[in-house]
Image (cartoon, helix red, strand yellow):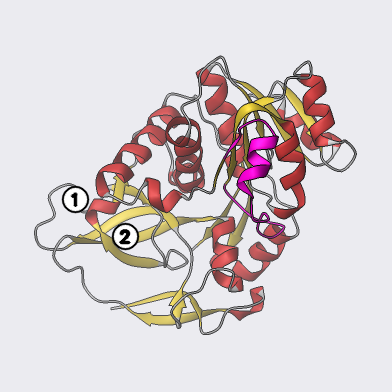
Amino acid sequence: MKTRGIILHQQGAPSVMRMEDVDLAEPAEGEVLVEHSAIGVNYMDVYQRSGAYKLDLPSGIGLEAAGRIASVGPGVDTVSVGDRVVYGPALGAYAVRRVIKASRVAKIPEGIDDETAAAVLLKGMTAEYLLNRAYSLTPKDTVLFYAASGGVGQIAGQWARHLGVRMIGVTSGRANCEAILGLGYDAAIDRKTEDIAARTRELTDGEGVSVVYDSVGAATFEASINALRPRGYFFSFGATTGEAPAVKPSLLQYKGSLYFCRPTLANYVGTDADFQYSAGEVLRLTAEGVIKPHIGQRWPLNEAPAAHEALEAATTTGSSLLMP
């Protein structure tokens, strides 16, 4: 059996991604074959393609997709041929079809189309573990969230509004600042024209926020530290401008007995049970209308390099999809 997919023979610029014919085995014990209808694009894909995260080459790329079950291997009784499913993170999603463990797919509820499922799952699970499990937010918390107009940021704003949490979003440009105010954010900070820490202090009557979720990294580390109240929590969950600097324990002490953590989604959905829980929460809130992902861009699968160029240039909004 054959499929078509993006293969990396080396890591580097977007141009290293090539569409190729790929041999595909029939599903083995506990596996299913998924025919993709929509593929999610995430910044993690950029890290893997660029070499920021090392891969064994040659390698597929891409972590999430939605589609239909085309065939099932022996011992599979949780899904059937024809079921609509979504999965992630599982390397190799930039393809027309792929084989994956049945325990790592989630059924798509009625009322959610495949594109929405592919656009929401990985970003939604990121929001889920950050807001629910890395730190359990309550209505008493005030949060500073970076890249608020991006895919994760938009979902996080809506989820936090559902929890009754006050959210301050950091984004760029007047249009994005206005847009996130309709997505669960109580206030917006323009990182291009405003002092993030000073504006955060102003918005919190000098107190600072209880939690910072920073996906930017090196460029915003100092602002994030200075935006926190005593005993605040700093979650560095991305590094679009490079890794945050090494953190001295004494810095956390002097800034108010702060907590610093570098979590990753893989550790929060590493078991099948954790994946099914997180995916279930994301799909449940999407079906209920709490989460409404915005799909800002679509590209044909063979134009994956263009999608990565746009992502790295920060010209995308909301979620991006590749269409097989």
Amino acid type shown at disc 1: Ser
Does residue 170 show up magenta in the picture? no
Residue at (61, 60) in percent of width and height: 299
Q: Earlier in the sequence, mark 2 or mark 1?
A: 2
Mark 2 and mark 1: span between their CA atoms? Answer: 11 Å
Q: Quadrant of residue 241?
A: bottom right
Residue at (51, 73) in percent of width and height: 54
> Is residue 318 something that shows in the picture?
no
How far across and how far down the image is residue 119, in percent? 51, 46
Q: Nearer the viewer, residue 217 or 128?
A: 217
Does residue 244 show up magenta in the picture? yes
Residue at (26, 48) in percent of width and height: 272
The circle on residue 34 is: 2
Give neighbour class at mark 1: few <14, some 14-19, many 20+ (Cα, 10 Å).
some
Q: Is 239 on the left-hand or right-hand side of 116?
A: right
Looking at the rendering, in which quadrant would you find the N terminus?
bottom left
Q: Is 75 on the left-hand or right-hand side of 54?
A: left
Which residue in the protein does label 1 denote?
Answer: 80
Q: Secondary structure at mark 2?
A: strand
> Is residue 65 something that shows in the picture?
yes
Helix, strand or loop: magenta stretch: loop
Q: Is 50 on the left-hand or right-hand side of 192?
A: left
Q: Is residue 285 above or below residue 299?
A: above
Q: Nearer the viewer, residue 297 or 174?
A: 174
- Give the residue furthest to the right: 193
How far across and how far down the image is residue 240, in percent? 68, 56
Q: Is residue 59 above or below residue 81?
A: below
Give neighbour class at mark 2: few <14, some 14-19, many 20+ (Cα, 10 Å).
many
Amino acid type shown at disc 2: Val
Q: Secondary structure at mark 1?
A: loop
Mark 2 touches mark 1? (CB < 8 Å): no
| Residue range (magenta) | 237-259
